[in-house]
Image: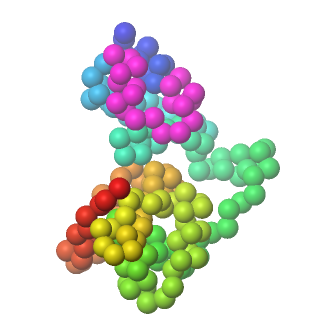
Amino acid sequence: MDSIEIKKAIEAILFAGGDPVPVKHISQALDIPQDAAASAADGLAKEYLDHGRGIVIKKIGDSYQMCSSKDMAGYVRNALEIKRNTPLSQAAMEVLAVIAYNQPVTRSYIEQVRGVDCSGVISSLVTKGLIEEKGRLDLPGRPLMYGTTDNFLRCFDISSLSELPRSEESVSDQQMEWELKD
């Protein structure tokens, strides 16, 4: 299989997949090493970007996904009669930041950081698919722990949490160690 055929196959897989497709699955489907699959997908993404297409290929963690380009959002919304999502509130952005930088975290941890009740904001973020339950803390009451989703990465146009901006003080120094119990 030559490089052109590999890129065509990746394009077809991503188009048919709709959701992010792990590079491991692409590699297995094409019977090529994972690094070769990732390299070909990166090359295809660059080709789409260089040609200014209405479709882009996004890398999300160890997965790839075809998406409409940002500058075509209005046309897509009009054609599909999609109501524009309301922007996230300041409270939602604050809760997302606490979760993204410290995940997995409990609701009580988020409320301790923010100083206010966050149950409504958390359920709204779960409904929007930006955060999800990541297990339970091994303490009395077994509180739920939350973390960000691939949809969070896609919406904020980053491929991994390591691309989040860092403050002067290392966020990892503030992170609490939790034991996940499923």
Residue 19 x %, y %: 53, 39
Outermost residue toward the left in this view = 173
* Residue positioned 39% across, 28% down in the render: 25
Q: Is residue 102 left or right of residue 64?
A: left
Q: Looking at the magenta stretch, what is its main secondary structure?
A: helix
Image quadrant containing the C terminus: bottom left
> How far across and how far down the image is residue 105, in percent?
36, 70
Q: Is residue 104 magenta?
A: no
Q: Position of residue 22 (x, y in %)?
A: 40, 35
Report if residue 21 lies within the magenta region. Answer: yes
Q: Is residue 114 above or below residue 126?
A: below
Magenta span:
12-31
Q: Please state if 72 lies on the left or on the right of 78 as rendered.
A: left
Q: Quadrant of residue 16?
A: top right
Residue beneath the point at 48% across and 19% down: 8
Q: Residue at x 38, y 84 (%)?
A: 113
The number of discs equals 0
Q: Quadrant of the N terminus?
A: top left
Question: Residue 67: percent from the left, percent from the top?
Answer: 56, 41
Above/below status of 66 relative to 33: below
Furthest-top residue in this view: 1
Q: Residue at x 38, y 86 (%)?
A: 112
Q: Is 23 on the left-hand or right-hand side of 126?
A: left
Q: Quadrant of residue 5?
A: top left
**Residue 30 visible in the current orientation:** yes
